[in-house]
Amino acid sequence: MKKYYTRACNFFYGKISREYIRKKISLSLNGSKDISFDTIEIISRSSKKKIKISDINKLKSNLRAKVQKDLQNITKEKKFRYLKLKKQPLIMGVLNVTPDSFSDGGKYNTKIKSYIHAKKMVKYGCDIIDIGAESTRPGALTINHKIEWSRLKHPLKEIYKLNKVISLDTRKEPVMRNALKFNINIINDISGLSHDIKTMNFLKETNLPFVLNHIQGKPSNMQKNPRYKNVVLDVYDFYEKKIRELRKLGICHDNILLDPGIGFGKNLKHNITLLRNISIFHSLGFPLLIGISKKRFIKDLANNNDSKNRYGGTIASSIYLIMQGVQILRVHDVNEIKQAIKTFKFLTLK
């Protein structure tokens, strides 16, 4: 039996969005009247077709039922413990306390430096601090959990005092368990909960919210010729399967963020295809978290216009993702992204 997927597209913003919703021309995205859509793309492994929402009733009954079910997920207000998603987009500020991360390795890997940087990110308006002590850049090797915790424990103890939502970027259950004493709020495991077999039981036991990431391979080999039949639908199917596994295990809460893992086991074409079709993941019914900050695809697109900080590419990608209804952006340069968001909102939402 052919499987179909529903992608919301052709979005409207601000005053126009609110007016179109009132006139029933468009449907709200994620329960927000500030962004809506009047078109969907119905996708299978062999076909694509765009239709106006006003034409949904013309579909055959089985397909219509599938699309209407997807639309319930697309239009409903998303909720997540600790976060006010109506204030979207929220900003997750990256804090790497590593000696070798691809962008800022060695810059914040002391207790004092990490605290100063975290405090600065809070001042500039980040909503979540995502702290990690193991580099997962392409080619990086796994480090022992004791080394990871030794890097993490002192910075985490200081950052805890900032009374901010803390996301722990780790693949290892012992590190997660050690961090519980600092009241971490979110687990961000880039392995898709597959690196450590104890992780899912830990999440069931603690009922902690978490990010469900997608990756092909592991950091040491993920960029060695990654392959997909259809990267968008393959990632979508991964999420459906993983969520079924979690439900079967007894993790029934809805405090899950989806991150399709830009740059994690994907080449340039895969990354761009995912970004262009990112709104398909709204039909899974969970908030989206996307990390595009300073990623390699920006360099590949910019060619001789590449720069060390990649502000331009990161800001352009961030604005595009906001226009697709993505709720959370994971970034290094909080102040620059907040500046871009404020400008964008003033120009579009008033």
Image (cartoon, helix red, strand yellow):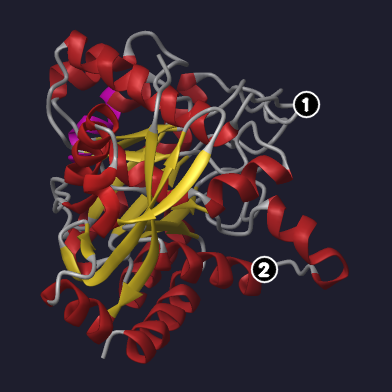
User: Any magenta on residue 104?
Assistant: no
Q: Nearer the viewer, residue 188 or 73?
A: 73
Q: Quadrant of residue 325?
A: bottom left
Mark 1 = which residue? 225
* One can see residue 337 in this view: yes
Q: Residue at x 29, y 32 (%)?
A: 63
Task: Please state the horizontal and vertical placement of residue 312, each as a whole percent of the image.
Answer: 64, 74
**Dominant secondary structure, magenta:** helix
Task: Please state the horizontal and vertical placement of residue 120, each as a whole percent of the image.
Answer: 39, 72
Classify 206 as above or below 309. Answer: above
**Which label belongs to residue 309?**
2
**Which label belongs to residue 3?**
none
Q: CA–CA distance between discs 2 and 1?
A: 26 Å
Amino acid type at circle 2 is Asn
User: Viewer-nearest of labels 2 and 1?
Assistant: 1
| Left or right placement of residue 275 versus residue 304 in this view | left
Q: Quadrant of residue 220?
A: top right
Amino acid type at circle 1 is Asn
Image: magenta residue range:
177-185
Q: Residue at x 60, y 22 (%)?
A: 142
Q: Nearer the viewer, residue 271 or 311?
A: 271
